[in-house]
Image: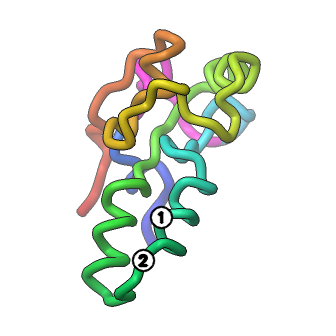
Amino acid sequence: GKSKASIARFRSKNAVGLRFGNWQLVFDHAVPFKYLQAELLKLADVTTHSVENVLNKFGTVVLITKDENDFLNAAGYRSDMPKAWDGIDALARYKAVGIEVLENTNISN
């Protein structure tokens, strides 16, 4: 029952103050879903704890502007991480294209 704006862990600096509607704001998976899916499928021991660990590592959501989303896509990061990605930094796509990301102050736990 939570809003997308309240569950996103981060938002871009340019998305601060924007709300959903008028196609201004995009709910973006920091690590594209195919990476999360691959990690889940690699689990040898599927438990609540192991699935939760993967979701915590790869399930980060960021609110970005439509223009930033278009920029990510044009840079080749629609569904890919940077080639030099360390497998840890969920925000690597944004850093690679210079999108400044901040903690989302509207988050609810």
- For numbered disc 1, what is the local secondary structure? helix
Observer-nearest residue: 69 or 42? Answer: 42
- For numbered disc 2, what is the local secondary structure? loop
Segment tinted magenta in the rendering: 11-20
| Residue at point 32%, 74% (across, down) | 52
| Residue at point 27%, 34% (across, down) | 103
Indicate the amino acid at tag 2: Leu
Instruction: Report the residue that reaches farthest toward the top.
Output: 98
Question: Magenta includes 18?
Answer: yes
- Residue 95, image x and y in percent? 42, 18
| Residue 43: assigned label | 2
Residue 19, compared with residue 98, is above or below; it is below
Number of marks drawn:
2
| Residue at point 70%, 34% (across, down) | 78
Q: Would residue 67 be found to the left or right of residue 64 on screen?
A: right
Observer-nearest residue: 102 or 56? Answer: 56
Q: Residues within 10 Å of mark 1 (few under 14, many from 20)?
A: some
Indicate the amino acid at tag 1: Glu
| Residue at point 60%, 25% (across, down) | 65
- Residue 58, image x and y in percent? 41, 54
Q: Label 1, label 2: how many angstroms apart (C-alpha)?
A: 7 Å
Residue 37, compared with residue 15, is above or below; it is below
Q: Is residue 53 visible?
A: yes
Q: Residues within 10 Å of mark 2 (few under 14, many from 20)?
A: few
Q: Which residue is mark 1?
A: 39
